Image (cartoon, rainbow, N blue to C red):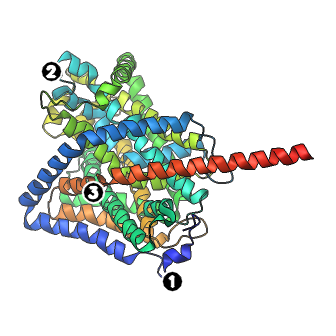
Amino acid sequence: MNDEINSTNINNGRNRSYDLGLIIAGVGIQVILVILMVIEPDATLNGIQSIFDRVIEVFGPLMLWFTLITFGIAIYLGFGKYGNIKLGEGNPEYSMFSYISMMTLASLASAAIYWSFTEWASYYSGPGLDMEASSFLALDTSLSYAFFHWGIGMQSLYVIIGIAIAFAVYIKKVPLFQVSTVCNAMLGDRVEEKKKKTFGKIIDFIVIIGIVGGLGSTLGLAVPLAGGGLTQAAGIELTFSVKVGILLTIAIVFTITSFIGTKKGMQTVSNTSTIICLALLAYLFIMGPTVFIMDNITNSLGWMVTNFMRMSLFTDPIAGGKFPDWWTIYFIAFYLNYTAFMGIFIAKISKGRTIRQVTWATLLGIRCGVWVLFGVNGSFAIHANMEGFVDVVGLVNKGAGQDAIYQLYEMLPGGTKIIPIVVMVMIVGFVASSLDTASLSLAQTTTLKLDENGDPSKWLRVFWCFILTLLPLSIMFVEANFNVIKMISILTAIPFVFILIFMYVGTFRWLKEYKAEQCTIEDDVNINVDIV
């Protein structure tokens, strides 16, 4: 099969612009899960939890090694001989600020805002590397583990798949931004078409379950976090109706941005939200314990860099602790859950950039922003807890982390009225950007043809916006547990490790062939010049 796949063949002569069977299968499994959570909530949760724990236990070491090796490969792409390969003709469509802002907000949603204030408290109460709980060392290194779990090691999972899809579309002329289509192009003529079609459907199904489950449950965290700001600023009680109103408001924003497109919609929301976030961080940094924040960030980054390898491969086999399973391996699984939709999105906005630019923007651009977020917010929370201003650890252990966040903001001028409103706006922007990206990736995965700009139907994106809203709304109505959907989506991401390994091999084969072709062309040009 020729690398330059004809889109007409993919459409198989049908007039539909979307894959109806794939959509029904992907949405259907989510409906079945919601029904099970209504009929047998405890049995469903316990059953999924036991399967989840067993899978994480068995595949955990593999996932640790896979992530570390992926990080090494990403570093090689950033420094190596393939770094100057340009992914498509022309200049980049987006400025570097917009490029990094969109990728950062797409990968974070509201989770980073919440955990930037509270995650260190969990590491303090239950630390890794066999440290004593609630000890001086556990507190001293608590932010370091947050930096690690939200760091460049995990982020490297997005790099290679983004480059693979971009290379396939912009250089190999694969017609669709789909993981399955790229994999089938890598298989070439070695596998018959019928088997490739089956292989592709399985991949697309895994991608859909991961995105819908992972991003749908994101709204479950965003609603109480935004609702806390509403209660703080206006004294409005967080009733069920208010929660639904918050969810629908967020849904309206990301549906509108999805409909008007990435350039006009998501770019504007991402840039605005990033500016608001940076302004709020600067305000907290200046008005808070500035010296302590600077010292703690420096100390925590230094400890993380020094212990990076130990943290990357820590499994605690002698003591038998659950920290690696509950935190590091869980984070890897969670990142794998985001890998497909981030890869598709990174490829979509990377036309005109080199492999080196994509690599370092993804590894350092996103992570530096996240480290600033966690460094400032986390250090502020640690200092407040140490001084007895806010019992962050106690509130987090009670499951009231959002209350801790707004109590911390109360310490600042304007923290009772103005800042909560700003935080609500920021949360809407963060979540809308992430779910806008999800709707794009889902539409790319289920489309059968793209327009002249490489975009799927706007109405297909709106449909997925509806599904991404309907799932958490249904869970809220039946008062089910969001963890079931989240665990299912992460479980489906485990097989993605093997798909990624295949894509790594195929990508480097393509890069090697392309580099050889370019060298041959340059040699021919030099020979002709010499002859002249």
Image quadrant where one finds the N terminus: bottom right
Total numbered labels: 3
On residue 265, the disc is none
Residue drawn at (26%, 64%) of the image: 471
Q: Would you say 87 lies left or right of 430 here?
A: right
How far apart, in angstroms, are the residues tagged by discs 3 and 1? Answer: 31 Å
In the picture, the disc for residue 492 is 3
Classed neighbour count for the residue bearing mark 1: other residues with Cα under 10 Å, few (<14), some (14–19), many (≥20): few
Residue type at mark 2: give it: Glu
Q: Position of residue 445 (x, y in %)?
A: 43, 65
Task: Give the percent coordinates (x, y) of residue 469.
Answer: 31, 63
Q: Marks 3 and 2, how far apart in space?
A: 34 Å
Q: Quick check: 77 above or below 245?
A: above
> In this figure, which residue is indicated by the disc labeled 1?
13
Q: 44 or 479, which is in the foreground?
A: 44
- Left or right: where does residue 514 sit relative to residue 9? right
Q: Which class describes the residues within 10 Å of circle 2: few (<14), some (14-19), or many (20+)?
A: some
Q: Is residue 306 visible?
A: yes
**Residue 54, image x and y in percent?**
15, 48
**Disc 2, disc 1: CB below 8 Å?**
no
Residue at 56% from the left image edge and 52% from the top image edge:
510
Mark earlier in primary sequence (3, 1) = 1
In front: mark 2 or mark 1?
A: 1
Label disc, if present, on residue 132 of the rendered structure: 2
Residue in front for this viewpoint, 325 or 379? 325
